[in-house]
Image (cartoon, helix red, strand yellow):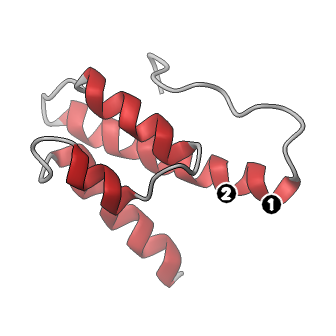
Amino acid sequence: MDPKYFEPIPEGLPEADAAARLKRLRHAEWGIAVSRLGGTLPDPKLIAELQRYINGELTIAEVAGIVEPPASAAIQAIVTRERLSKAA
């Protein structure tokens, strides 16, 4: 995804932690891409909170409760992708 909105995954993390973080990173990138396709540029606060989600500090439900509006295209896309990835 270009431009890069999120920090790279740190090296040296245990494999399971790195895999979980990569999964959350892909979800966040997907949400931003969907939002951009709809013509909405990402809000800096949303990017900051999504970085916390990627780092495992927040769940996506918590991010949705922080960011205004919580029904943004990016948040909706991330929630959907997260739900579908758990069902697979």
Kind of residue indicated by mark 1: Ala
Report the residue at 41% width, 39% height from top: 50
Label 2 residue SS: helix
Residue most extreme to the top: 3
Where residue 10 appears, x then y in whole percent? 76, 31
Report the residue at 64% width, 49% height from top: 21
Q: Residues within 10 Å of mark 2 (few under 14, many from 20)?
A: some
Is the Cβ of the residue at disc 2 closer than 8 Å to that at disc 1?
Answer: yes
Report the residue at 32% width, 36% height from top: 32
Viewer-proximal residue among 15 and 68: 68
Where residue 38 appears, x then y in whole percent? 14, 36
Label 1 residue SS: helix
The residue pinned by badge 2 equals 20
Up-down relation of residue 49 to residue 1 (above or below): below
Q: Quadrant of residue 78?
A: bottom left
Viewer-proximal residue among 33 and 59: 59
Kind of residue indicated by mark 2: Ala
Q: Quadrant of the C terminus?
A: bottom right
Question: Viewed as shown, does residue 49 lie left or right of 53?
Answer: left
Badge number at residue 72? none
Q: Quadrant of residue 29?
A: top left
Q: Quadrant of residue 81?
A: bottom left
Badge number at residue 16? 1
Up-down relation of residue 43 to residue 34 (above or below): above
Where residue 83 appears, x then y in whole percent? 40, 73
